[in-house]
Image (cartoon, grey):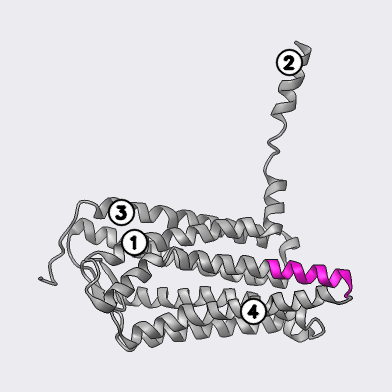
Amino acid sequence: MNDTVLQSESWFIPMDIIMIIPLSICTILGVVFLFLVATHRTCWSVPMLFICNSCFVEIALSCVLLATVIYTLKQDLRKEPGDIASCVFTMFIVYSLFAAEYYSYLLTALYRYISIVYPNHRFWQSIKCQLCLIISKWIFSIAFGLSVYLTNNIVYNINNQICQAPLGLSVILMYNAVVIYVIPNMGIILVYMLLTRYVHRMSARTTVSNRLFHARRELKLIQRTFILACTLICLGIPYLIFVLISFVTEPPKYHFRIAYIFIDFSILIVMILRYYFTQPVKDIIRRVLPPTNIVAPTRAIARTTA
């Protein structure tokens, strides 16, 4: 096969356009979310700091992936390879943002755990400490992306018009999987199990009812954090399938194009769930939107008067 000639398919352009839609919607929803939080003092709290941090990561990730899709669309229209250097650098940013997203979920879970199990450790719950942890998370995520970028493990795939670490049984693929997926998700599961066990112990002995209620509420919030992480993992299953296939044989020719459709929609679903799970933002939206149950009583009165 000639690696310098792009073989165009009839479904390339429609698929590129479809991928643009969820990323554009996600970006808009994310900006609106942060605007609502920034303009309402009721949302200014340490827990909301973590939520906004995760939301910012999702906005940045959707913007970068949107730029990647537009780049792919442009090259598909031209039917020629693109600028490899910029493509590789863009994927370095994507790797960094994926790591930042999963570790933001882990930081959220750890904060919930510390606030319940160690309520007297005020320093660990302070906004100053949490800001330091968030900054450390960003430094780690960027360092991870650089470790992949500077070792030349991101290569250009002309068939998929994307730059990625090539699939196959390799050290770099295992390294990416462990750092991005295994460590943060195992950490979230461990925190959830420990807090569940702690809440059960509190329920079994005489405990202040307010503290027990608070603990159960925090446990529910960690469940929601885990759901967000699982949403990305579940919709990333096609990518995982192609990875497993690559261990024994060549994956399908356009595997990255197919896998990234699910990844793009997973980010949109996570953003929608963020609106659903964040009660302060839901309360703001309820106050802003007009009530929808006024029409029915009006019609009923009209029938009775008739």
**Residue 142 image position (x, y, % from top left):** 46, 82
Residue bearing mark 3: 15
Q: Earlier in the sequence, mark 3 or mark 2?
A: 3
Q: Earlier in the sequence, mark 2 or mark 1?
A: 1
Residue bearing mark 2: 303
Residue reaching furthest to the top? 306
**Residue 288 image position (x, y, % from top left):** 69, 46
* Quadrant of the drawing holding the N terminus: bottom left
Hey, what amino acid is under mark 1? Val
> At 33% from the left edge and 60% from the top edge, which residue is drawn?
70
Q: Are marks 3 and 2 in contact (CB under 8 Å)?
A: no
Q: Is residue 275 left or right of residue 203?
A: left
> At 59% from the left edge and 60% from the top edge, which residue is drawn?
274
Q: Earlier in the sequence, mark 4 or mark 3?
A: 3
Q: CA distance from mark 4 to mark 1?
A: 36 Å
Badge 1: how crowded within 10 Å, few (<14), some, or many (20+)? many
Q: CA distance from mark 3 to mark 2?
A: 51 Å
> At 52% from the left edge and 73% from the top edge, which residue is drawn?
101
Residue bearing mark 1: 69
Hey, what amino acid is under mark 3? Met
Q: Earlier in the sequence, mark 2 or mark 4?
A: 4
What kind of secondary structure does the magenta stretch mostly adopt? Answer: helix
Q: Secondary structure at mark 2?
A: helix
**Vertical order, 34 against 153 (above or below):** above
**Residue 259 image position (x, y, % from top left):** 34, 64
Q: Magenta residues, as a range?
A: 207-220
Q: Nearer the viewer, mark 4 or mark 1?
A: 4
Figure quadrant of residue 89: bottom left
Give 200 or 183, whichever is nearer the viewer.
Answer: 200
Q: Earlier in the sequence, mark 4 or mark 1?
A: 1
Is residue 149 at least partly visible in the picture? no
